[in-house]
Amino acid sequence: MRKSVIVPTAPKPAGPYSHAVVANGFVFVAGQGPLVPETGVVPDNFKEQVRQTLKNIETILQGVGCNLQDVVKVNAYLTDPTRFSDFNEVYREFFGENPPVRTTVQTGLIKILVEIDCIAVLP
């Protein structure tokens, strides 16, 4: 079974894609950025962009009945690899003990400094 999901309290997708797809006991969350859903504003500060991006992912996961502890895989895309330690500092706020596996790469993003996607297991 496959179900596409749009979570009304998350930022609207920037293109023709779903926030998440639920399939075979997994939740596949599309790449999310730091847009604040209530205001449509992107924070200027790198750490705040990471924090807001993870909050957006958390909102989507909650919309399908999961939370961050259900995440098993994270892919993170940073425009500036010299900010890796700042990224890790904020990331630890959300994934403290028993963090999921993760891949972090440098990429060329437009208008944002970070994008993150993930895979979670339905509880």
Image (cartoon, grey):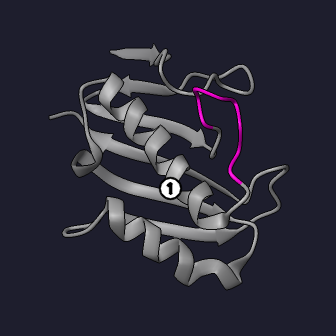
Report the residue marked by disc 1.
51
Q: Quadrant of residue 18?
A: top right
Q: Is residue 29 above or below residue 5?
A: below
Q: Quadrant of residue 79?
A: bottom right
The magenta region covers: 36-43
Q: Is residue 111 left or right of residue 99?
A: right
Q: Say which amino acid is labelled 1.
A: Arg
- The crowding category of the residue bearing disc 1, from other C-alpha atoms within 10 Å (few below 14, some 14 to 19, many at least 20), is many
Instruction: Farthest residue to the left: give it.
Output: 123
Nearer to us in this view, 81 or 47: 47
Instruction: Farthest residue to the front: give it.
Output: 39
Any magenta on residue 21?
A: no
* Marker count (numbered): 1
Residue in the image at 34% along x and 59% along y: 94
Q: Is residue 75 left or right of residue 33?
A: left
Most common SS among magenta residues: loop
Any magenta on residue 38?
A: yes
Q: Is residue 84 above or below residue 23?
A: below
Residue 97, how many percent across, how many down?
19, 70
Nearer to us in this view, 18 or 11: 11
Residue in the image at 60% along x and 36% along y: 36
Dot 1 lies on which element? helix
Q: Is residue 40 left or right of residue 53?
A: right
Nearer to us in this view, 100 or 35: 35
Q: Quadrant of residue 62?
A: top left
Residue in the image at 73% along x and 27% along y: 14
Residue 81, how many percent across, how many down?
69, 80
Q: In the picture, which quadrant includes the N terminus?
A: top left
Residue in the image at 42% along x and 66% along y: 91
Q: Is residue 116 left or right of residue 113?
A: left
Residue 86, how many percent across, how many down?
55, 78
Q: In the picture, which quadrant includes the C terminus?
A: top left
